[in-house]
Structure formats: C-alpha cells, structure tokens
Image: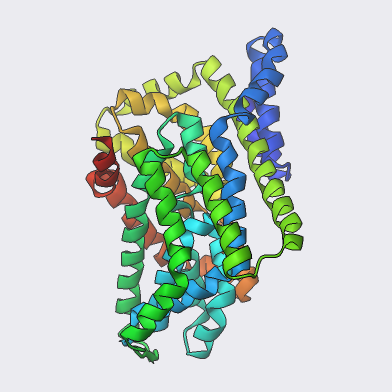
Amino acid sequence: MALIIIFIAALAIGIPVAFVLAAVGTVHLWMIDPGYLLQLPQRIFVTASNYNLMAIPMFILAGDLMGLAGDVDRLLRFSRSLVGRIKGGTAYVMVVFGFLLGGPLGSANAEAAMLATTMYPKMKEEGYKDSFLAGLISSISVCGPLVPPGMLMVIYGVASGASIKELFLAGIMPAVYLAVALSIVIFLTGRKQNWAVTEFSGWGEVWTSFRGAFISLAVPVLVLLFIAIGVCTPTEAAAVMAVLFLLNGMFNYKTVKIKDLYELFLKAGTLSGAILIISAMGGVFGWTLAFDQVPQKVAAGMLDFTQNPYAVLLIINVLVLLFGMIMDATPAVMILVPVLMPLVAQMHYDPVHFGMMICFNLTIGLMHPPIGTVLYTTSITTGVEINTLYKTIWPWVGVCVVVLLIVAYVPDTIMWIPELFRR
C-alpha cells in the first residue's frame, strides 16, 4: 500500500515517470532487504542494454527521414487516388492515409500531428465539423503503434520475452479492422451530412501516384518480409529501413542533405534516450516486483476470484484501459507486463496475441481522457478546445473498444498471419 501511495503521489505532483519508477523500485527493494540495493546499477544496465531496444532510434530516424524526403505528400496523393467518387471521400482519404502512415511513423502522437497539419485545414473548408475531424484524427492515429514496425511492440517484446517478429506480423490485422470500423462510422455519419463528393481522377492517376509512392510503400513491406522470413532481426531491419529511406531521400528525391542529418540524429537520440531511461527504470521496478513475487500473488488473487478465461480477459482489459487513462503506454507496458505474465502462463494465453491486446488497449488510452496525449496533440495542432474533445471523443473511443474486444476474444482474427510463418 505504501508503494501505491508513493507512486500516485509522485505522479500527481509532476515528477517524470522514469524517476517515479526508479524511486518506487528502490524503496520496494529497500523494504525487501537493503543489501540488495547494491544490485540496482547492474539491473539498470542489463535492462537498458537489451539488444532489441536498439531498434527504437532506428525506427524514429526512419520516420523522420520519410517526412523530410517528401514521402508523406506522395502517400497522401496515392490515398486520394484510391478513394475515387464517393460522398465524404476526403474523410476516407484520411483513414487510408492514416493507415499508410502508421508503420513508418510508428507513433500515435506523430501521426495525429501529421494528419492535423496536412488534412484538417482542407476538410474544414469542405464543411466537416471541428469535433468530427478531431475525433477522426485521434482515432485513426491509434494505427500508428499498431501497424508494424511499432515501437510499443518492441518494448512489449523486451518486457515479456515474446517474439517481436510475430508481434509485428500480428499487428497488421488490428490496424486493418480499425480502419474498416472507422470507415463504417464515416459512412453512417455521412448519410446525414452535406459532405462534398470526391471525384475519381482515373486509373492513370492511380498508377502515377502509386509509382510516386512506391518506395514509401515498399520499404516498410520489404523490411517486414525480411523479418518474417528470418533474413534479419527486427533490430537489423530497423537499421535497414533507416538506411534505405536515407539513400532514397539523398540520391533519388534529393531532398535530404548532409546538413540535415545532425538534427535528425539528435532528435532520434533524444527521443530514444528518454524511452530507454523509462525502460531501464521500469525494468528495475519489474525486477523488484518479481523478486517479491507480486506477479504470482496477483495471478493467484485473480484466479481465486474467477478461473473463467473470458472473465479474466475482461478484467485484464478493464484494468489496462484504466491504467492507460492515467499513464503513457511505454511505462505502462514496463509496469503491467511483468505483473501479468504469470497469469498469461497459467491461463495458457498466447503471449503474442496477449501482447497485441495490451498494446492496442494502451494505445486507446492515448486518446482517452483525462491524460490521453493524442487528445492534447490533436487539440494543439487543430485549435479545437480540449474540453470539446473531452465531450465528443467517447463515440470514437467506443469504436476502438469494440475492435479491441474482437481482437481479444477472437484470436484467430489476428493470429493467422503469425501462424503462417510459424510452420
């Protein structure tokens, strides 16, 4: 109980989450046995030096190189060519564009900012309501961490020991289902609205825009294929993707200059450094919990309450969703996964399926009041008041939760792709 009070109080007064995790882990270890404090530096180093975490700065760098090279504009043109003649077509373009951006960007906040700056002004001119646009931007941004390669999957794989390759493969279908669900919402909403009808520019435009966006589309797919067939590890694949986008931007598009690289490397290093610090401190906290057998106690307590696998899954989802309301996804994974893994083993859940459920759930938390960072990103970049978003985001959250429940209770809907490569 003392640890919970320290944890909540530290977050409430604004202490950075990495230091909160470090403080709580240290206090917990001191309560167990002060002599074990000497092992803390070693535990921090062991967690931070995990080979798989090296993929994070490469994925960040790849996304920034893609933006600098102009790939975003090419993907947007291709998305528009695909939609064709349909009422509310620009809204469907945003869904397609958001899905295509998901893998290269890998971040819900980055995707929300990109969609808000590229799509929001034009759609506002076409008569779409502010609240509708802000909700659509927030919800399609959930695809960011789901479409492979996603950084959150890497962090879950490090925390759980699950195959990162299979997590990447399992992430494809949840993003597809979410895009389809949001398209259904657009269709049903559009019947009552006077939205503009987009025009089909012809198959020539589809082919031309596809050729222009080919490298932007092919590189993430090629990298995922390399991972799936075992040509390279996810960490090596991240480096390959960054190098390919760098070469493409410098020698093909000629939009990336040598002078730009310093800022790109600095940003990738800074962001990945913050993530690594959180991961290291979360690893310490998870180690102290395991040392005190807290995960086993939590699993035993939950199984005493019910042993129905569907009920346990529902309880876990509610717990994770509540946790995602007050904490960012990365530290939440580092805290929750060590606690829940013994339960996963006892209930015979597939750790890859369980991981996608957790990642999806925590990503929804990014658009969920009161702390959801995607809401703040959307509010700042669109100018829509945050209080307005708090009131109008709930139907969009509901759509995401429905897709989450399908993913959680029908594992075959997402696991058939990893199963193809397990044989």
Between 67 and 16, the one nearer to me in the picture: 67
Name the quarter where the C terminus is drawn.
Answer: top left
Q: Residue at x 76, y 55 (%)?
A: 262
Residue furthest toward the front?
251
**Residue 132 screen position, x and y as percent:** 46, 76
User: Vertically, is 8 above or below 112?
Assistant: above
Q: Residue at x 36, y 65 (%)?
A: 179
User: Vertically, is 309 above or below 317?
Assistant: above
Q: Residue at x 57, y 21 (%)?
A: 287
The quarter holding residue 306 reads top left
Q: Which colour assignment does the render follow?
A: rainbow
**Residue 67 screen position, x and y as percent:** 59, 66
How many numbered discs, if any? 0
Q: Residue at x 65, y 17 (%)?
A: 29
* Residue 356 in sight from this viewpoint: no
* Residue 169 in sight from this viewpoint: yes
Between 262 and 126, the one nearer to me in the picture: 262
Between 132 and 356, the one nearer to me in the picture: 356
